[in-house]
Amino acid sequence: MTRIRKDGAEYVGYEYKEKSVPASFASLYLDSYPCFGWEEDPNGVSRKENAETAGRAVLRFRRDRKLCNRAELTRLQRNFDSCVAEIDTLEQSKRSGAVIGALVTGIMGTAFMAGSVFAVTAEPPMVVLCILLAVPGFTGWILPYFLYRTLLRKKSAKVSPLIEDKYEEIYEICEKGSDLLI
């Protein structure tokens, strides 16, 4: 039974969804969720950002409760969400290995420099040992920048095709969802 409001419009019952996503993926969600029957909620109330949601966007959606193929659309939506999570993980993996390599190198350089300081402050001062330890110490302080860039470039070359494959999978998922809405 369809309910007609006093103003002559047909009543539509909605289900609502609030999604906190990384800010870099907000546009992707806004463009893709309509393929699963969701539309941006025009009545969405904005909340203040806090430390917990820094770098994240809170998106609010709604969709008709009487949507056909809702179970299949929900399955496709979950598949989409997992693909986006994998892309996010792959993006983070680019930087994490490079950061770890640079930090380890910097810490090793600091350890050599500490040994150099201890060698020069010993009684009697061991200047030759100080110099021998200072060279790798300074190298360990200078090298991390270049090491970071090199590792980042190599990891990006490996991960970029995987990310592109995930975006292609997202495109196919959205296409299937859009076909179910017709």
Image: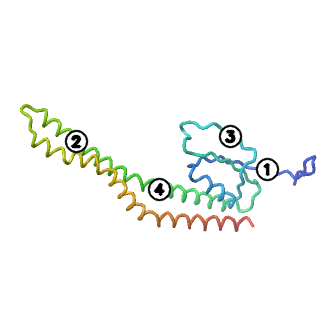
| Residue behind mark 2 | 111
Structural distance between the alpha carbons of marks 3 and 4: 28 Å
- Say if 150 sits above or below 112 in the image: below
Structural distance between the alpha carbons of marks 3 and 1: 22 Å
| Residue behind mark 1 | 13
Structural distance between the alpha carbons of marks 2 and 1: 66 Å
In the depicted view, which residue is nearer to us: 57 or 117?
A: 117
**Three-letter amino acid code of the residue under disc 1:** Gly
Residue drawn at (85%, 50%) of the image: 11
Please give left or right for residue 13 compared with residue 36 in the image.
right
| Residue behind mark 3 | 46
The tag earlier along the polypeptide, 2 or 3, is 3
Q: Residues within 10 Å of mark 1 (few under 14, many from 20)?
A: few
Please give left or right for residue 15 compared with residue 119 in the image.
right
Please give left or right for residue 50 compared with residue 69 in the image.
left
Residue drawn at (59%, 57%) of the image: 78
Q: How many marks?
A: 4
What x and y, as percent, mark residue 154? 37, 62
Tag 4 and tag 1, C-beta contact below 8 Å: no
Structural distance between the alpha carbons of marks 4 and 1: 39 Å
Residue drawn at (34%, 49%) of the image: 100
Structural distance between the alpha carbons of marks 2 and 3: 50 Å
